[in-house]
């Protein structure tokens, strides 16, 4: 049996109707046909034939695009939460003052004190200089959170938009 898919909602259908919806002629299921005016084959002059395979490919592409992206794939390392304490402890362990650390990494004393107090989050280049000078690690891979994907949420279809428009 040949698979017949509604061009509007993507559902499998036993048969399809040729309907004009919002100026576009589509092969739709009976449920979606109520959103447009039925056309006869003589009324359709240059109907672009959309194969069921093409509809399936389009729906698969839409499903791939609508899948949520894992933002943790893009993040390689991030600044640790206790960076201020680590910098201060490492500096004291080496016996340096904030001024001495600042001179070694070519930074002002005020920047060092702000980092150690947690008032300032150091930019990436400064993080690297601090790590090299103090021999500490300030960047670590983030711990991943497990988020359950809801199976009840489906992508928005053209039919959903038309239903919303008809309600107004």
Image (cartoon, grey):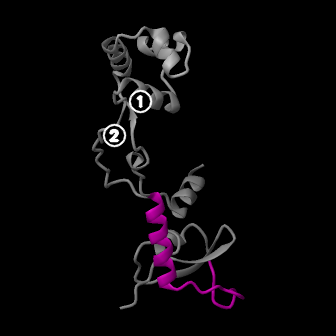
- Viewed as shown, does residue 127 lie left or right of 50? left
Q: Quadrant of residue 5?
A: bottom left
Residue 150 image point, x, y percent: 32, 50
Residue 90 image point, x, y percent: 33, 18
Residue 133 image point, x, y percent: 42, 25
- Circle 2 is placed at which residue position? 141
Asked if 5 appears above or below 83 in the picture, the reply is: below
Tell me the SS state at disc 2.
loop
Please give the label number shown on residue 132: 1
Tell me the SS state at disc 1.
helix
Q: Residue at 45%, 10% (x, y): give it.
A: 98
Where does the magenta region start and end?
38-66
Instruction: Tell which of 82 and 167 is nearer to you.
Output: 82
Instruction: Tell which of 109 and 140 is nearer to you.
Output: 109
Residue placed furthest toward the right: 45
Q: Residue at 42%, 13% (x, y): give it.
A: 116
The question of residue 15 being in magenta is answered with no
Q: Are marks 2 and 1 in contact (CB under 8 Å)?
A: no
Instruction: Tell which of 74 and 131 is nearer to you.
Output: 131
């Amino acid at each position: 049996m040949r698979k017949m898919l509604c061009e509007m909602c993507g559902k499998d259908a036993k048969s399809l109707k040729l309907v004009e919806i919002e100026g576009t002629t589509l092969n739709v299921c009976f449920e979606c046909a109520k959103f447009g005016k039925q056309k006869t084959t003589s009324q359709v002059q240059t109907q672009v034939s959309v194969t069921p395979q093409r509809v399936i490919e389009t729906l698969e592409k839409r499903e791939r695009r609508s899948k949520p992206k894992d933002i943790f794939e893009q993040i390689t390392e991030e600044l640790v939460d206790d960076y201020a304490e680590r910098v201060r402890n490492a500096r004291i362990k080496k016996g340096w003052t904030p001024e001495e650390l600042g001179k070694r990494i070519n930074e002002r004393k005020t920047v060092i004190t702000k980092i150690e107090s947690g008032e300032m989050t150091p930019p990436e280049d400064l993080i690297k200089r601090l790590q090299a000078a103090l021999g500490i690690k300030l960047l670590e891979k983030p711990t991943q959170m497990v988020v359950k994907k809801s199976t009840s949420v489906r992508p928005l279809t053209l039919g959903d938009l038309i239903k919303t428009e008809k309600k107004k």
